[in-house]
Amino acid sequence: MKVRVLILPRRGLLDPEGRAVKEMLQDEGFPVRDVKVGKVVELDVEEGTDIRAIAEKYLVNPLVEEYIIE
Amino acid sequence: MKVRVLILPRRGLLDPEGRAVKEMLQDEGFPVRDVKVGKVVELDVEEGTDIRAIAEKYLVNPLVEEYIIE
């Protein structure tokens, strides 16, 4: 099965890439309120694999990132 | 509204970070067949914004990346 872990900077933390994209899109005239840039890790794993364990132990830094499994 | 653009390396193209994560997880005993690592761009925009245009013009390199809007 394929599972995706989306990893985004926590609200309020520094996200220079998100800020750069936001400012560029606003300069281009797009009505953008906010942009965050993070990572997506797409895993092709056996059914029943503990994705949460993988995410929390190896992929995400909970001090500065939050994640969504989908 | 919040929209996410997931940007992943095209199948068959070099993805050194995905490969590193796959090998590390396999070494740790997880039944992982494949891993891709890409980017997620989360946009908070006005209703009706043309996300596809933003993605194709500014965020994605179609030669080496594919994207999903969600």
Image (spheres, coloured by chain):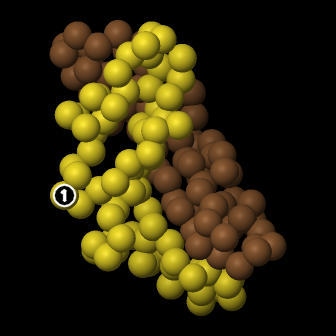
Chain colours: A yellow, B brown
Instruction: Give the letter of the chain under mark 1.
Output: A
Question: Furthest residue to the right?
Answer: B48
Question: Is residue A9 something one can see in this rendering?
Answer: yes
Q: Looking at this view, is A56 or B35 the one in front?
A: A56
- Left-right relation of A60 to B60: left
| Label 1 neighbour load within 10 Å: few <14, some 14-19, many 20+ | few
Quadrant of the drawing holding the N terminus of chain B: bottom right
Q: Is residue B29 above or below residue A26?
A: above
| Residue at x 38% of width, y 48% of height | A67
- Left-right relation of A48 to A65: right
Q: Is residue A63 above or below residue B18?
A: below
| Residue at x 55% of width, y 47% of height | B7
Q: Is residue B1 above or below residue B46?
A: above
Residue receiving disc 1:
A63
- Left-right relation of B57 to B4: right
Residue A5, given in percent of the width and then of the height, sits at 43, 39
Q: Which of the 4 image quadrants contains residue A30?
A: bottom right
- Left-right relation of B20 to A25: left
